[in-house]
Every structure is written in structure tokens, then in C-alpha cells.
Image (tube, helix red, strand yellow):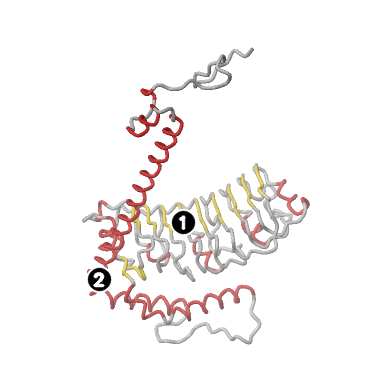
């Protein structure tokens, strides 16, 4: 016979049935106690649990409704306060469109693509981007519902009155159409910005002096320009669900503190391998997420192999068929590919057999490879 007993007070002499609890053991609900007196104590416990769940669900629903109401009130207040800024908003959005289309200040198109010419892969991506920008040219009617993001707008959404008090800005789905980048430098203590589902650009935040986390997913970003000396403290950057072409990734390689970069769900067909003037691109990058792009062949592995700090690389749901053999430069025979990579995920690609991924066994610190599914 076992020496163990259950924590519920099981009585071995009662044919496996639990003893009926006393009324004092039941929840303090009067209906539950009444049912228990009639012998239905299990039903009473169940009823009490269902009732408790329903109360919690109603509280959560009421909280969400109130939060949405407050968010709508803040947006209405911002619209009222920004009527005088409408002209500036439209000017900034027009400048952005002209820049994305390659139009200089004199109105001359500096880069025109002929639909009849043979386009390289990169030019095809550029054409897709410009087509989306051409469609955006007709969005002037929507500017009446767009907001200008400046320090005053951040104060409204954060519920504070001083720039020195703002640490986190929650701006998701607030219909911001452009930003006054120079004015945002007043936010000297701002460390995190959550600004998904707007129409903002990465460059809009380059003047925020101490920004560490920036989330700009689903902002219809079609290009990234030069960032100058901005983002000196930025560690986490999310740019997923945009329309960023491969050639613009080079502007991110100089960010000195960047540790995590999410570029999933974009238009990437290649990952840049050449970074002019940079001996160590992405010097502190540890996590790189390239899921759901259009990457093919083995180029992306060769391009990322030299990233000195990379420990996690996500390449799920692309068009990769194999991992190529990576050969070090003859002048640096002791340099190994992916020197610090520990986790590689390549789920849902076109790799059919084990031989397609064998080359990664030569990477010195690799601990795990995830290969599930096949396109």
C-alpha cells in the first residue's frame, strides 16, 4: 500500500469518494451556501466559479470600453488643438512624398523608372514602393483626419504637462500623419515610443535624445533616409509590416547601440552585404528578425555571417532553399561565420532534406536550429 495521500483529504475507506465539505469551507456566497444545504455543494462551487468569471469578464470589458472612450476623447482634443497646425502637417507630408519619389526642390524627378525596361530585383522593389507612394499622392483629402506629432501632442496622450515627465509615449493608432522632428527634441527623458498603425517615419524621431525603444510597425514606411547622428541610444527598433526596400537597410547599420531589429513583413529580397565606411556594421546587434520577406538563395547568410554580436537570426517564411558553405577571407583565416550565433529559425522555407542545412554545423556557437514546415 502506498504511503502517500492526496492533499484533498482522501479517505481510503470511502470507496474513492471525497468527504462532503462543511459549509464553512464553501465560498461566502449566500446562494451557494443555500444550495449546499440542499446537498448540491458541487453545483454551488461551479456556480460560484462561473459567477466570478462573469464578473471579471464584465470588469475587463468595461475597462476596455472606458479606455477606448478616453483615447477617442484625447484624439478629439488633439484635433481641436491642432487646427492651426494643419498647414504645417500638409507641408511635411508633401515633403515626405516628394522625397520618397525622388523629386528635388525644383520639382525635377531625379529617378524615373520606365515600365518597359528590364528591372533588376532591387529596381522591382523600388517600383513597388513608388507605386504605393503614387497611390498615396491622392490622400490629401485624408489629411483633415491626420494629426501632427509634436511635444504638445505627446503631453496630451501621456496626460502630463511637462516634457521632463514623459518616459513612455503610447501613440498606437492615433492617426498621426507626420511629426515635427525638431520639436520632439524637447522630450529629453523619453525612452520608449509605441507608435504602431500611424503614418510616421523613422526619421521623425531622430532628434529624441535618449530614445531606447521605438515601435513603428504598420506605418506605411516606404523608405529610410540618412539618420545622421540620431538614435545614439536606440536599442530596440521594430519596423515590421511596412514596405521598406533592401537598399535602405544600410542606413541602420551605423546605429551604435542597436541590439534588436525587427524587419519582418517588408519588401526585402536581399540583405545588404556592403556598408561603405563601416568596418563593423550593426556593432551590438544581437537579434535580427527577417521573417516573412522575399529572401532567396544563400545571399542573406553571407551578408549576416560577419555580424559580430548576432546571437539570434529569424528567417522564417521566406524562399530559402539551402544554407551555403561560407568561406572566410584568406587574409583572416581565423575568422568564423556567425561567431556568436546561438539560435537560427528557418521554418516554412523551401529546404527539403537535411543536407540543405548541414553547413550550419560549422558555426562555432550555434546551439539550436528550428526547421519546421515547408513551402
Decide: is 39 above or below 210: above
How many marks the image carries: the answer is: 2
Asked if residue 357 is positioned above or below residue 26 in the image, the reply reads below
Relative to 247, say whether 66 is above or below.
above
The x and y percentages for residue 341 are 61, 47
- Judging by the rendered image, the residue that carries numbered circle 1 is 237
Q: Is residue 261 above or below residue 5?
A: below
- The residue indicated by pointer 2 is 82
Q: CA distance from mark 2 to mark 1?
A: 29 Å
Q: Residue at x 28, y 58 (%)?
A: 70
* Residue at x 47%, y 53% (from the top left corner): 258
Neighbor class of circle 2 (other Cα within 10 Å; few <14, some 14-19, many 20+) is some
> Which quadrant: the C terminus?
bottom right
Q: Where does the image place residue 84, in percent across and percent down from the top left?
A: 23, 75
Q: Name the foreground residue: 244 vs 272.
A: 244
Coordinates of residue 356 in the picture (x, y in percent):
75, 54
The percent position of residue 83, horizontal first and vertical second, equals: 24, 74
Q: Residue at x 28, y 53 (%)?
A: 166
Dividing the picture into quadrants, the one containing residue 348 is bottom right
Amino acid at each position: 500500500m502506498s504511503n502517500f495521500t492526496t492533499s484533498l483529504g482522501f479517505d481510503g475507506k470511502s470507496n474513492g469518494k471525497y468527504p462532503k465539505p462543511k459549509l464553512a469551507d464553501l465560498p461566502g456566497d449566500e446562494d451557494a451556501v443555500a444550495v449546499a444545504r440542499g446537498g448540491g455543494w458541487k453545483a454551488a462551487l461551479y456556480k460560484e466559479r462561473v459567477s466570478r468569471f462573469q464578473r471579471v469578464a464584465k470588469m475587463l470589458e468595461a475597462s476596455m470600453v472606458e479606455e477606448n472612450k478616453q483615447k477617442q476623447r484625447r484624439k478629439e482634443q488633439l484635433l481641436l488643438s491642432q487646427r492651426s497646425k494643419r498647414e504645417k502637417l500638409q507641408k511635411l507630408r508633401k515633403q515626405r512624398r516628394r522625397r520618397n519619389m525622388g523629386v528635388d526642390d525644383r520639382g525635377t524627378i531625379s529617378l524615373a523608372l520606365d515600365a518597359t525596361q528590364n528591372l533588376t530585383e532591387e529596381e522591382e522593389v523600388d517600383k513597388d514602393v513608388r507605386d504605393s507612394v503614387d497611390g498615396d499622392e491622392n490622400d490629401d483629402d485624408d489629411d483633415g483626419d491626420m494629426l501632427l506629432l509634436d511635444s504638445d501632442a505627446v503631453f496630451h496622450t501621456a496626460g502630463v504637462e511637462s516634457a521632463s515627465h514623459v518616459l513612455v509615449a503610447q501613440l498606437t493608432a492615433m492617426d498621426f500623419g507626420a511629426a515635427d522632428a525638431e520639436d520632439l527634441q524637447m522630450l529629453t527623458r523619453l525612452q520608449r515610443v509605441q507608435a504602431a498603425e500611424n503614418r510616421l517615419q523613422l526619421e521623425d524621431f531622430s532628434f529624441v535624445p535618449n530614445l531606447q525603444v521605438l515601435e513603428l510597425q504598420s506605418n506605411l514606411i516606404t523608405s529610410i533616409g540618412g539618420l545622421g547622428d540620431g538614435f545614439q541610444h536606440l536599442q530596440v527598433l521594430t519596423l515590421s509590416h511596412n514596405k521598406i526596400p533592401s537598399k535602405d537597410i544600410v542606413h541602420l547599420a551605423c546605429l551604435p547601440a542597436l541590439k534588436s531589429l525587427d524587419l519582418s513583413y517588408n519588401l526585402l529580397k536581399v540583405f545588404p552585404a556592403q556598408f561603405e565606411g563601416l568596418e563593423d556594421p550593426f556593432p551590438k546587434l544581437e537579434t535580427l528578425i527577417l521573417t516573412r520577406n522575399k529572401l532567396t538563395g544563400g545571399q542573406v547568410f553571407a551578408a549576416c555571417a560577419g555580424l559580430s554580436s548576432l546571437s539570434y537570426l529569424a528567417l522564417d517564411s521566406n524562399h530559402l532553399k539551402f544554407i551555403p558553405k561560407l568561406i572566410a577571407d584568406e587574409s583572416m583565416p581565423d575568422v568564423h561565420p556567425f561567431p556568436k550565433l546561438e539560435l537560427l529559425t528557418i521554418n516554412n522555407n523551401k529546404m527539403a532534406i537535411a543536407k540543405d542545412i548541414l553547413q550550419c554545423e560549422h558555426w562555432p556557437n550555434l546551439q539550436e536550429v528550428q526547421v519546421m514546415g515547408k513551402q
